[in-house]
Image: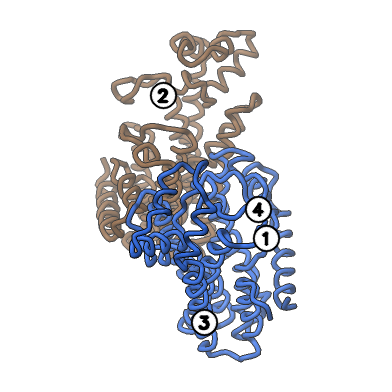
Chain colours: A blue, B brown
Amino acid sequence: MSTTIEVYRGLVEERLADWTKALPDDPLYHRITYLLGLPAKRVRPVATLMGCALFGGDPRAALDQALGIELFHNFTLMHDDIMDQAPLRRGQPTVHTKWNTAGAILSGDALLVKAYRLMGTHPRVLPVFSQRALEVCEGQEMDMGFETSDAVGVDDYLEMIRLKTAVLLAGALEVGALRGGASEQDAQQLGRFGEHLGLAFQLRDDLLDAFGDPEKVGKRPGGDLRAGKKTFLLIRGLERSRELDRTELQEELMKGPEVRDVQRMLRVLEELGVPADTEAEVDRHHRSAIAALDAVPAAEENKTPLRALADLLLQRAH
Amino acid sequence: MSTTIEVYRGLVEERLADWTKALPDDPLYHRITYLLGLPAKRVRPVATLMGCALFGGDPRAALDQALGIELFHNFTLMHDDIMDQAPLRRGQPTVHTKWNTAGAILSGDALLVKAYRLMGTHPRVLPVFSQRALEVCEGQEMDMGFETSDAVGVDDYLEMIRLKTAVLLAGALEVGALRGGASEQDAQQLGRFGEHLGLAFQLRDDLLDAFGDPEKVGKRPGGDLRAGKKTFLLIRGLERSRELDRTELQEELMKGPEVRDVQRMLRVLEELGVPADTEAEVDRHHRSAIAALDAVPAAEENKTPLRALADLLLQRAH
């Protein structure tokens, strides 16, 4: 474990605690404090501080923006949980379950306003943040559209997770870089590292949901498959099935989730070589991420924490 | 009808049409275009242009901010309609009815981001906008809390509509004033005009809902009373009833909305002098609004359009 990650996480948690303590005693803010209080890795705000330090800035100077990124992330969680009708988040009731939908909509809105407030009025930071925020909305729209579409290909899926997941990590790094004095061009280059890293992370997460060690993953494997969720694995599996005239996955998808044979789907995906395809895609984006970081014109020793962050996210041994 | 209002409204509609035309062809934006396309008076963006011109600025210089205010207003409409479970808006299906709740949440979120984008990075404009935006959320929270609270007084109600309705008109004027070169202090003074005007407008709206001419109001009178909604009239009526040991209003509120005798409630409110009390409160805020405008250090001839806007909102004869 990199000490820089721990130090930065400590700074973020401290700033976050101060911030929540100053909130008015009102249900609007109780819901926000509740969600922010659930255990979290704080990867995005830590990335913001790293982006700032990479270009020689004092990471503490980017703490407002780091907190803004974390608030934005929690805004997306609060609203996504309503849209996805998710009862639990990190093992705890979601905000709309614990309170109600109206409250979760409104507290999410307030979180977004608070995030903008913390971003400040830096003429270079705000447009980047708004652009990334809009892309996250577009990614969620694309994801919702997938539920009713029969023609989702692997490239559609990659574009969806790029927008819904990866661009926010990119934005977190870019905002930090700009606060640290980077040029737009150098911030964008660091953003590419974040985008590929985010893609690799999400693909690995899809893989773990199906094939991860249940003890390490902390949930019953195959939840996405049972729900019929169009992840990289299922989309790739259906493509391979068409090529080889195999019908098992389609058969299982025709059934309701309760009677769906997830073990059979997992076996078929193995036989079709889908886990290996997914691993290859994870590796490809991991390598692209590292190449993007290598190409950032900054001191090599300043890049060490970012390499450690990539290892942490992809759970690679050091 | 003031020609300035019409000219400014034309500028706003034109800019809005250009803006919606440039949106990507995606359901995320179709919902936004739909809501923005419903007939509307565009009072808030017109107020922004007036605020700019009041201090000698070219109103066209504030068109981005005016549009941003209108987008923010429509964001609140889209989300409020979900929270209030409203089936219709201006006689047309609400966004969550025409599409679905998830879509209305997400398109509302995108509207808020787009509003911020248009506000720009002016270091004086953004903090004012964020402050007003947060107050609107706090007002909606207060309004929702009223539904389950038995101890709502007249002052609570006035504070709620100040936050939920009046501060956005204030913010629209302030943002325009700042774009027109006003000092923070002068912008705040103009904001006071907007706040009192917004309060007078909402109180008058409450009054019309109960006692308006059905043909002019365009809906069956007493809708708020039937729903048991805690408006100024009902709260004041319950206060007066307690003072005079009258129980008719409480009796009707104990009944379900379908069997509630709205005509009886209207008679009782008349007997208690509530319409006159409400008129007096409207007048009080109208006078405060005019006094606030009088005190703004700007050329008298530049104030004429703002006086016409007040007349329009309160439907006073010229």
Image quarter for residue A43?
bottom right
Contact (CB < 8 A) between labels 4 and 2?
no
Residue picked out by circle 1 = A40
Residue picked out by circle 4 = A90
Q: Is there any visible trace of residue B154 in the rendered image?
A: yes
Contact (CB < 8 A) between labels 2 and 3?
no
Pinpoint the chain carrying mark 3: A
Question: Which residue is painted at 51% across and 85% down in the image?
Answer: A291
Question: What residue type is disc 1 on?
Answer: Ala
Where residue B196 sits in the image (x, y, percent)?
A: 49, 40
The numbered mark, 1 or 4, whose residue comes first in the sequence reads 1
Mark 2 to mark 3 CA distance (whole Å): 64 Å
Above or below, A102 against A225 in this view is above
Mark 3 to mark 1 CA distance (whole Å): 26 Å
Q: Quadrant of the C terminus of chain A?
A: bottom right
Q: Is mark 1 on a helix, strand or loop?
A: loop
- Which of the two discs, 3 and 1, sits closer to the camera? 3
Residue picked out by circle 2 = B209
Question: Which residue is painted at 57% across and 28% down in the image?
Answer: B147
Q: Is residue A195 left or right of residue B8?
A: right
Question: What residue type is disc 4 on?
Answer: Arg
Question: Which residue is painted at 65% across and 90% down in the image?
Answer: A301
Mark 2 to mark 1 CA distance (whole Å): 48 Å
Q: Is there any visible trace of residue B159 in the rendered image?
A: no
